[in-house]
Image: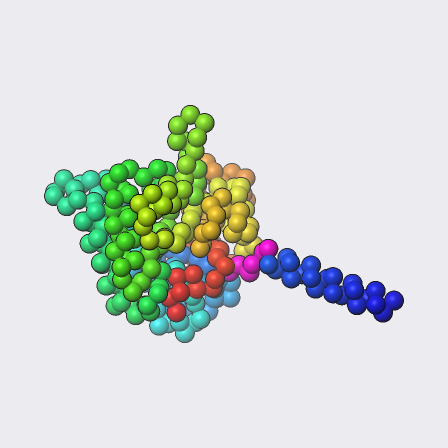
Amino acid sequence: MRHFLLYAVALAIAVQALAAQNNPSQHLGFDRNLYPGDVSLPALRKQFAFTGYWLNNPPGETTNTWLGKRDILLKNNFGFLVLFNGREDAQILRIQRRGTKPEALGKQDGAKAIAAAQREHFPTGTILFLDQEEGGRLLDEQSSYLLAWTETVAASPYKPGVYLSGQPVDDGPGQTISTAQHVRQLVTAKHLHPIALFVYQDGCPPSNGCTLTPPPLSGAGTPDIVIWQYAQSPRRPDITKACAKTYAADGNCYAPGTRIYLDMNTATSDDPSHGR
């Protein structure tokens, strides 16, 4: 009996070890355009290991309330998801008509991201994520801008990453593609520096909505990603019908016990940009 018990214990430990190997620990994080305020940090830290941190004005904003907040976030033991708001296609084309090509614009914005990260005292090796809001296959001017940005960052003390869609869209008869797939194809074809991917895919499934227990990172539909944004505020009604009840009545995803709406992310690191 003693030998049987020892065998059973050993078997249980082996099963647990295998499960841990197949399901690496995941960490919750959040991002939002507006800084949540110093007084909210302790409550948010109870649930979230890392936070988004904008280096320039977030999408749709005319100011950046995150600047200068790295030290207090460090004091509250947050990891970082460092973001730089990129250009949408209409803006790239408008600037191109004025004489600045997309590649040159990408290099300029990459230099701005590097300078901002240095001003905010992010260390060497921090991953800077370019925010690419528009999904599907990139147009030529979009890919020229994006890859010029990532190559500029790759040539600096920092590392390049991109926030982009993992949602498949139609790409011809019987075919689909996501922005993440297209960017990886371009990087491979052009033999460029590797890019860390922060994928947004809030469709249910594979997401389970606004919940503190996200699905495994491998379920996002894009392999080998660094971060998965699995819930957005406000939710996208057309793709979140199956998990609508997990969101608040106004369609937003709120941090527990607060009225702070946010996007929820999951990663295998508690500091996915390595920004500490």
In percent of the image, x 28 and y 47: which residue is there? 146
Q: Quadrant of residue 142?
A: top left
In percent of the image, x 51 and y 66: which residue is there? 46
Vertically, is 22 above or below 78? above
User: Which percent across, then down, holds residue 140?
Assistant: 26, 38
Q: Report the magenta stretch's main SS.
A: loop
> Residue 251 versus residue 107: which sits nearer the camera?
107
User: Which percent across, then down, holds residue 232?
Assistant: 44, 48
In percent of the image, x 65 and y 62: which residue is there? 17
Q: Is residue 26 magenta?
A: yes
The quadrant the C terminus occupies is bottom left
Q: Which residues are magenta?
A: 22-27
Q: Residue furthest bottom?
A: 75
Total numbered circles: 0
Asked whether residue 151 is in view, the answer is yes
In percent of the image, x 41 and y 36: which residue is there? 177
Q: Is residue 245 left or right of residue 58?
A: right
Q: Is residue 38 magenta?
A: no
Vertically, is 24 above or below 42? above
Vertically, is 123 above or below 215? below
